[in-house]
Amino acid sequence: MASEMDDEFPADLAGFGYEFKDGKLKNIKTGEPFVFVVREDDHAYNQKHYEALGEVITEEVYKLLESECNLKRSPIPVGASKNEPSTFIFLSEDALENADRLLVLIHGSGVVRAGQWARRLIINENLDWGTQIPFIKEAQKLGYGILVMNTNDNSYTIKGSHKRQKIKGSSSPEEHACYVWKKFVHKAKAKHIALIAHSYGGCVTKELFLQEKKDFVKRVFAVAMTDSVHYIAKPNAFKALVKISRNWVSSSHPLDTPLSDEGGDVARVSSGVNVHEKTSYASMESVFKFLEARYNAVTKGDGKPAEEESGGGACSQEESLDRKMSIGSDCFDMDDENKARVDAAGDHQMSDSETEGQPLENEEGNKDDGTLERAMSIGKEGAVADRADRTEDKENNI
C-alpha cells in the first residue's frame, strides 16, 4: 500500500534530479530528457510527480524572468499586507516610465503562470518553445517596456487546511487583467501599447477591450493572438479591436497563410504548426514583424487610427463553435441556439492544453482540421493535470 510519504516531493528542481542545460530539461546524472514514467503501472503517482515538478518549474521560470530578462515582481493587490493572499506580475524597470512603447503578455488558462506559454513544452521541448522569455528579449531589443500578467494565480490555500481564498484583484483571469490595467497600465507613460495573447488570453483581451475601451483604443496599436479561443458574436462592438489584431492559429498550412475569412472577427493566419500550444513560438518572428509594421504605420503616419482602418477576416461561425469546444464556452458570447449546439455535443468545458499532465506524445490528436475531433483532443489532453484543482475549488465553492 502506498504511504502518505509518496505524495511528498522535492522543493526544487535539483531535488527531482533535473536541471536546465542549454534551455532543455535534462537529468542531472544521465543528461537524458524528462521521463514521465517514474513508477511502472502507477499512473496516479506519475501524474502527481509531473504536477509537482511543474510547480517547481514555475518557480524556475520566475527566477529566469528576473535573472535573464531583468524583470521585477510587483504585488497584486497593490499594497497587500504580509498576511493577505496575494500574487504578482512582472515589470521591466522601464515598464511605467518608457514614454514610447509597452508590451503586455497574456498567457492562456490552466496551470501556466507568468512567463509561460505551455508547461508541457517547457518540460518536453525547451524554454524557448514553452516560455515567454524569447518574446521578452526580442521586445526589449526593440525598445519596449515589459509587463507580464499572471492571470491564473487567483486563489491562495489557507495554511493548515484545504480551503482556498480568492486573491483580491485577481479572483479570475479577467479581473486580474482589468485590475492590472487600472493600477499599472493607466499609469504607464507609453503612448503605444502592444499585446501578445495566447489561447484564453484572447478572451481576456476581449474583456480588457470592453472594460478599458477608451484607453485601449487610444493607445493599443496592435494585438497579436496565438491560437486564441475568443469568439465575437457581435462584430460591431469589437471593430476597433479587430482592426488592429491578427490571430496565428494551429494549422498544417505554411506560416502566415491566410485562412478562412468571413469578416467580423480577427484575421486568421496559419502558425505553421498543428499543435495548439506550439503556435506562440512557431509564429514569433511573424508576430514581431506584424507589431513593427503596425508601430511604423502609427508612428510614421502611414496608417489610420484603429476606428478608421479596414478590418480583418474571421473564421466561420461553424469553425468558431468547433474551436470553443476545446476550452469551454465561458469566454464566448453565444445565443441560445449556439449554446444548445455546444451542450448537445457534450461537456468539453476543460482547461486549456497548456495544463496537460501528459508528455508530448499525443501531438497527433491536436491537428487542426476545423472539426470537433480536433477541439475535443485539446480538451482531453488538457484535462488531467488541472482536474484535482478544479474539483477542490468546486468543493470549496471557489
Image (cartoon, grey):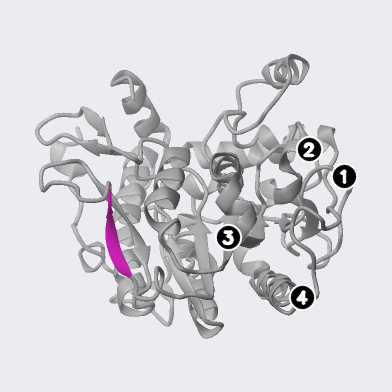
Q: Earlier in the sequence, mark 3 or mark 1?
A: 3
Q: Which mark is residue 74?
A: none
> What amino acid is found at the position of numbered circle 3 in the picture?
Leu
Q: Earlier in the sequence, mark 4 or mark 3?
A: 3
User: Range of the magenta residues?
Assistant: 72-76
The secondary structure making up most of the magenta span is: strand
> What amino acid is found at the position of numbered circle 4 in the picture?
Gly
- The residue sitting at 36% across, 51% down in the picture is 50
Nearer-the-camera pick, 220 or 327: 220
Q: Position of residue 142 (x, y in %)?
A: 56, 82
Classify 10 Å Cα crowding around label 2: few (below 14), some (14-19), many (20 and above): some
> What amino acid is found at the position of numbered circle 1 in the picture?
Gly
Q: Is residue 10 depicted above or below 157 in this figure?
A: below
Residue under numbered circle 4: 301
| Residue 62 falls in image quadrant | bottom left
Q: Earlier in the sequence, mark 2 or mark 1?
A: 2
Residue under numbered circle 2: 235
Q: Give SS at disc 4.
A: loop
Classify 10 Å Cα crowding around label 4: few (below 14), some (14-19), many (20 and above): few
Q: Position of residue 330 (x, y in %)?
A: 57, 29
Nearer-the-camera pick, 233 or 213: 213
Residue under numbered circle 3: 195
- The residue sitting at 65% across, 31% down in the picture is 332
Residue under numbered circle 1: 263
How far apart are labels 4 and 3 at the CA level? 21 Å
- The residue sitting at 35% across, 45% down in the picture is 153
- Can the viewer see residue 356 in this picture? no
Q: Give SS at disc 2.
A: helix
